[in-house]
Image (spheres, helix red, strand yellow):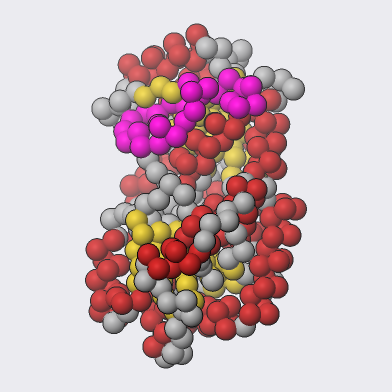
């Protein structure tokens, strides 16, 4: 197998879905003998300590959105280490990665874009996409995490289809299914009665994750349907105070358990009966949902990004329209009260994961892509 010399170029090393994903990918590829570099354009560098010693790490400490000085520093870094592929994680790093591939000539590194968001949030994002769209059309490859996302971006930004590839996220099934710790102790820690069901969510506490939808549906579940349950939220972020306030106003603060940010989510997934991801945007192909499925937790996800590529509605989980609290509450009730249905869904989810969404499948797809010598000969004539 050809040795890969690749650089993952990220805006920062904060704790987030795409950053965490590529830190883990860098570690696995380096353990296979590949020459892997992770470059962060700016702070925070929270995930730096999670990179193994085999991965080369370079932090640029950028002071502005674009710096010619940093571009030249990166050019020196790339050429001295004979990097053959630059993977720009999300749009912003493209303003460095694509010029680097041009400055080093046709014998220089390929420029690959990995887009890890389904929808843009603001007018500011839309403005910058005038620049990023131009660059995306000239990259050698554009990686998307779901077919639905790829179709949307390809049409909206006129990306040539020959450049587009889809690589679904994968989960380390052995790591998650090997968890064997006592679930009773954790229930006691969070004062969860043994006969209460647990509805959970693992996500950053950010507006686009729409925890408010889950809170409203949970309130309906315990008040109108009289179900004994608690809501367990794993994660941290700017919406924490708003979530606590919402729970208080709904009268369910005694049913809410907030864990904060954790390094190992397995203990918390292990006590969940249902996993909910209520996002209204951004979500592409949720690692958190895959991890829940791998531990036998039934997923209930909003119809955003590639959710329908991950879950067969009614077979191995449920899909609900974004912000539809009534539908979410109904699906939760079915999963939590129909044990035969829940067990069937858990088994179907395990079978699907082993067949389609393993970490090995994802790694192999990246290795094949990064090992390719193919450059897009039509870069200069791409649609403008």
384 or 155: nearer the eye? 155
Q: Residue at x 65, y 59 (%)?
A: 309
Q: Where is residue 8 in the image (x, y as percent from the top left)?
A: 50, 29
Quarter of the picture containing the N terminus is: top right
Q: Where is residue 280 in the image (x, y as percent from the top left)?
A: 44, 63
**Residue 160 higher or lower than 145, as above or below:** above
Numbered range of the magenta stretch: 30-56
Q: How many marks?
A: 0
244 or 380: nearer the eye? 244
Q: In the rendered image, is residue 289 in sight?
A: no
Give the image quarter of residue 158: top right
Q: Residue at x 61, y 12 (%)?
A: 107
Q: Residue at x 68, y 63 (%)?
A: 349
Does the segment drawn in magenta span residue 36? yes
Give the image quarter of residue 58: top left
Q: Where is residue 135 in the image (x, y as percent from the top left)?
A: 50, 33
Q: Residue at x 56, y 35 (%)?
A: 25
Q: Which residue lies furthest to the top in this view?
A: 80
Is residue 356 toward the left or the right of residue 382 in the image? right
Does the segment drawn in magenta span residue 348? no
Q: In the rendered image, is residue 114 in sight?
A: yes
Q: Position of residue 39 (x, y in %)?
A: 43, 26
**Residue 90 higher or lower than 8, as above or below:** below
């Amino acid at each position: 197998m050809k040795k890969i010399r690749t650089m993952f170029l990220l805006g920062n090393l904060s704790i987030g879905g795409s950053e965490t994903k590529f830190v883990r990918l860098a570690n696995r590829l380096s353990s296979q003998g590949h020459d892997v570099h992770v470059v962060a354009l700016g702070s925070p560098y929270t995930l730096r300590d999670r990179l193994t010693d085999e991965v080369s790490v370079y932090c640029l400490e950028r002071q502005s959105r674009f710096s010619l000085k940093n571009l030249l520093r990166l050019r020196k870094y790339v050429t001295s280490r004979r990097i053959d592929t630059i993977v720009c994680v999300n749009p912003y790093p493209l303003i460095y990665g694509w010029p680097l591939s041009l400055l080093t000539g046709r014998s220089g590194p390929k420029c690959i874009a990995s887009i890890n968001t389904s929808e843009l949030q603001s007018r500011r994002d839309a403005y910058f996409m005038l620049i990023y769209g131009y660059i995306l059309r000239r990259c050698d490859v554009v990686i998307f995490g779901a077919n639905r996302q790829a179709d949307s971006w390809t049409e909206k930004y006129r990306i040539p289809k020959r450049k587009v590839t889809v690589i679904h996220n994968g989960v380390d099934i052995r790591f998650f299914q090997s968890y064997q710790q006592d679930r009773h102790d954790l229930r006691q820690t969070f004062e969860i009665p043994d006969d209460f069901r647990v509805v959970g969510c693992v996500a950053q506490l950010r507006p686009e994750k729409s925890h408010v939808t889950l809170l409203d549906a949970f309130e309906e579940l315990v008040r109108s349907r009289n179900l004994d349950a608690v809501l367990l939220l794993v994660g941290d972020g700017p919406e924490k105070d708003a979530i606590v306030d919402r729970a208080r106003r709904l009268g369910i603060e005694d049913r809410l358990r907030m864990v904060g940010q954790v390094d190992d989510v397995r203990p918390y997934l292990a006590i969940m009966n249902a996993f909910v991801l209520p996002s209204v945007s951004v979500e592409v192909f949720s690692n958190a949902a895959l991890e829940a499925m791998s531990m036998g937790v039934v997923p209930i996800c909003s119809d955003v990004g590639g959710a329908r590529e991950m879950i067969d509605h009614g077979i191995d989980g449920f899909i609900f329209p974004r912000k539809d609290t009534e539908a979410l509450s109904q699906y939760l009730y079915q999963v939590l009260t129909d044990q035969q249905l829940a067990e069937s869904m858990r088994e179907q989810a395990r079978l699907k994961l082993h067949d389609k969404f393993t970490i090995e499948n994802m790694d192999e797809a990246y290795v094949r892509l990064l090992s390719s010598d193919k450059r897009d000969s039509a870069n200069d004539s791409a649609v403008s």
